Image (cartoon, grey):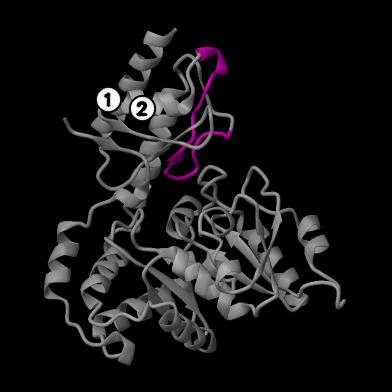
Amino acid sequence: MKMIDLRSDTVTQPTPEMREAMYRAEVGDDVYGEDPTVNRLQELSASLMGKEDALFVTSGTMGNLIAVLSHCQRGDEAIMGDLGHTFLFEAGGISALGGVFPHTLPNQPDGTLSMDAIRQAIRPNDVHHPVSKLVILENTHNRCGGVVLPNDYCEQVGTYAHDHSLKVHLDGARIFNAAIALEKPAKELAAFADSVTFCLSKGLSAPVGSVLCGDHAFIDQARRLRKMLGGGMRQVGILAAAGVVALETMVDRLAEDHARAKVLANRLSQLPHIEFEMGLPQTNMVFPSISKNLQIDAPELVKRLKEKGILAGSVGPYRLRLVTHYGIEDNDIDMTVEAISQTISKIQ
């Protein structure tokens, strides 16, 4: 039985063009800075983000960790959302490995942190307090529904942070999804940030890797930290080659994922006992909620869908997470809606 995997866009498989590029990749020792394919990926990434330099890293989590360690010293404070990836899903690395204190603020439904909350969070110059050094934003915002942060809001945060001597890091794991949704170049969305990470291995479909971008001095420090964390890689152009293909061929294709997510959400919204409390999708993430009157919770529904060949995620007792991506076709959407409809009808 074919499994339709909607758990995440991390399950994407590399394209045939990526596999061919990996096979033919010109390589060298990247720790010496001699891998030409890695260098090409980093130059392309820096250009797309509008930054001076870039560093290929193994994952978005590593990229975010390196960014925080570059911007902050032990005992410093990083301001971030309580639903942000760095706070929820990165194993507490900034504290465990960097001694950096996370100051969490409530994420608003649109993924933002209120400006009033940011203003109040920045510490006065007082020996009793940690030093506020960094603000972290996430775009698109995963746990808020794959929503896109407004560009004027991001610029406002950047201006305020810089005026108060704070740096800004953008967790842009899916920044190209945001760029497609807003019909703006990614560099415009990252312009306010001192550093930005983006993932190659989600919707862009490369098998592994993320890129961290910033100015030359920042990337010099980041490179040293990458080595310290065990991330110094050698003939890694074999992987970087897929990243180059991803950036050159897969960005515009993300619009297909967004379109299918909207179709999936619209069709699910017509089913009984399905609601969209978080709103309809802006990008490739669909978060339907099931009515509590249905007498089944989301984890149990996920289990029953798996029996029908549909892999889904649950992000709460009554909420599913479905993510469209490369490899999901129109017929898969039809089959998913039918499976959910049949499952619900048997419970009523």
Drawn side of residue 336 relative to residue 141, left or right: left
The residue sitting at 27% across, 73% down in the picture is: 240
Q: Is residue 139 depicted above or below 324 in this figure?
A: below
Drawn side of residue 130 relative to residue 344, left or right: right
Q: Which residue is mark 1?
A: 307
Q: Which residue is mark 2?
A: 303
Query: Can see residue 28?
Result: yes
Residue type highlighted by circle 2? Lys
Q: Quadrant of the C terminus?
A: top left
Q: Position of residue 314 (x, y in %)?
A: 46, 35
- Res 69 → quadrant: bottom right
Give the CA distance from mark 1 to mark 2: 7 Å
- 169 or 128: nearer the eye? 128
- 209 or 172: nearer the eye? 209
Residue type highlighted by circle 1? Glu
The residue sitting at 32% across, 87% down in the picture is: 31
Q: Are marks 1 and 2 in contact (CB under 8 Å)?
A: yes
Drawn side of residue 268 relative to residue 337, left or right: right
Q: Position of residue 268 (x, y in %)?
A: 43, 24
Q: In this picture, which residue range is highlighted in magenta?
A: 278-294
Label 2 packing within 10 angstroms: few (<14), some (14-19), many (20+): some
Q: Position of residue 275 (x, y in %)?
A: 53, 23
Indicate the secondary structure of the residue bearing disc 2: helix
Q: Position of residue 6 (x, y in %)?
A: 34, 39
Indicate the secondary structure of the residue bearing disc 1: helix
